[in-house]
Image (spheres, rainbow, N blue to C red):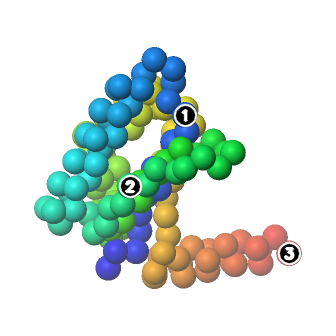
Amino acid sequence: MTDSGLLIGWGDVYPGREEQALHLFNDAVAYYGSLLEAGRIGRFEPFVVGPHGGGLRGYMLVGGTPEQINALRADDEFLGQVARASMLLKDFGVADLYYGESLGHIIEVFEREIGALR
């Protein structure tokens, strides 16, 4: 079941690094596409955000089983892309996503912790 994932988001490109950032974006799309095709992830969607007055310029959703996402986080190509992106893009980040069964579990954890604070 694909109920875990990553949100990979970024802001503006550092000035003078536009060509490198576009090359990285294309490499990332090809990389995640190949992982999807090989069954190493269960979902992949890239997005570019239009003008909206905020700092978010784009993001990618990557989904899979918890095992697939954990394996991705340890993959050298993934780690290299994260390193390059952090050098080319402002406000770059990778965050865990929870949906499906994992969403129910994380909500239960939050409810338990809220109860512990009473």
User: Residue 92 in the image: x percent, y percent?
Assistant: 51, 39
Q: Which residue is found at the position 32% from the left and 61% from the top?
A: 44
How many angstroms separate mark 1 from mark 2 (CA)?
16 Å
Q: Which residue is found at the position 25% from the left and 40% from the top?
A: 27
The residue at which mark 3 appears reads as: 118
Q: Is residue 40 visible?
A: no
**Mark 1 belongs to which amino acid?**
Asp
For residue 16, above or below residue 102: above
Residues packed near mark 3 inside 10 Å, few (<14), some (14 to 19) or many (20 plus): few
How many angstroms separate mark 1 from mark 3 (CA)?
42 Å
Q: Quadrant of the N terminus?
A: bottom left
Q: Are marks 2 and 3 in contact (CB under 8 Å)?
A: no
The residue at which mark 1 appears reads as: 12
Residues packed near mark 1 inside 10 Å, few (<14), some (14 to 19) or many (20 plus): some
Q: Is residue 39 left or right of residue 81?
A: left
Q: Quadrant of the C terminus?
A: bottom right
How many angstroms separate mark 2 from mark 3 (CA)?
41 Å
